[in-house]
């Protein structure tokens, strides 16, 4: 497991810090931080490396093949996809770049209304 920035299949960005062992079972756990500054509470998370909800376990995505007719397919996507290593700045996007993009994409609380002429 490579430390760095990962994108969740639903769109969120996370920085993996490393792999830890569960103190009772020895199960490998991924330690990561959400890069979404709007999340309340602690942004640090752990997730099993493998298993049903594992960090490295692919997810099955429901797709629509025909207009408004959902057809379940076994389209497997990685739960988290490696984006780059923000620690040495070798990749295009750092954690700070991603957080800035996410903050810029958050809509303001004021509705966008056209002025009448």
Image (spheres, rainbow, N blue to C red):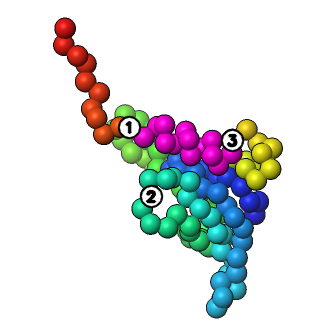
Image quadrant holding the N terminus, namely: bottom right
Tell me if residue 105 is in the magenta stretch: yes
Q: CA distance from mark 1 to mark 3?
A: 22 Å
Q: Please give the residue where the numbered disc 1 appears in the rendered image.
A: 107
Residue occupied by mark 3: 93
Q: Compared with residue 28, is residue 87 higher up or lower down, i.e. above or below? A: above
Q: Residues within 10 Å of mark 3 (few under 14, many from 20)?
A: some
State the residue position of label 2: 39
Where residue 110 appears, as percent x and y from the top left, is 28, 35
Above or below 17: residue 25:
below
Query: Residue 94's image quarter?
Result: top right
Asked where in the image residue 3 lies, by quadrant, the reply is bottom right
Q: Earlier in the sequence, mark 2 or mark 1?
A: 2
Identify the secondary structure beneath mark 3. Answer: loop
Residue 96, percent across and down? 63, 46
**What is the CA distance from the residue labelled 2 to the residue labelled 3?**
21 Å
Crowdedness of circle 2 by 10 Å Cα count: few (<14), some, many (20+)? few
- The C terminus lies in quadrant: top left
Q: Secondary structure at mark 1?
A: loop
Is residue 67 positioned above or below 51 on the image? above
Specify the segment rendered in magenta: 93-107
- What secondary structure characterizes most of the magenta part? helix
């Amino acid at each position: 497991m490579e430390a760095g920035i990962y994108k969740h299949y639903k769109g969120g960005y996370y920085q993996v810090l490393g792999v830890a062992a569960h103190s009772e079972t020895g199960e490998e756990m991924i330690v990561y931080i959400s890069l979404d500054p709007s999340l309340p509470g602690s942004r640090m998370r752990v997730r099993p490396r493998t298993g049903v909800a594992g960090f490295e376990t692919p997810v099955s995505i429901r797709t629509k093949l025909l207009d408004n007719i959902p057809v379940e397919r076994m389209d497997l996507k990685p739960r988290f996809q490696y984006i780059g290593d923000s620690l040495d700045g070798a990749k295009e996007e750092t954690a700070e770049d991603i957080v800035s993009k996410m903050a810029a994409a958050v809509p303001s609380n004021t509705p966008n209304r056209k002025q009448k002429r």
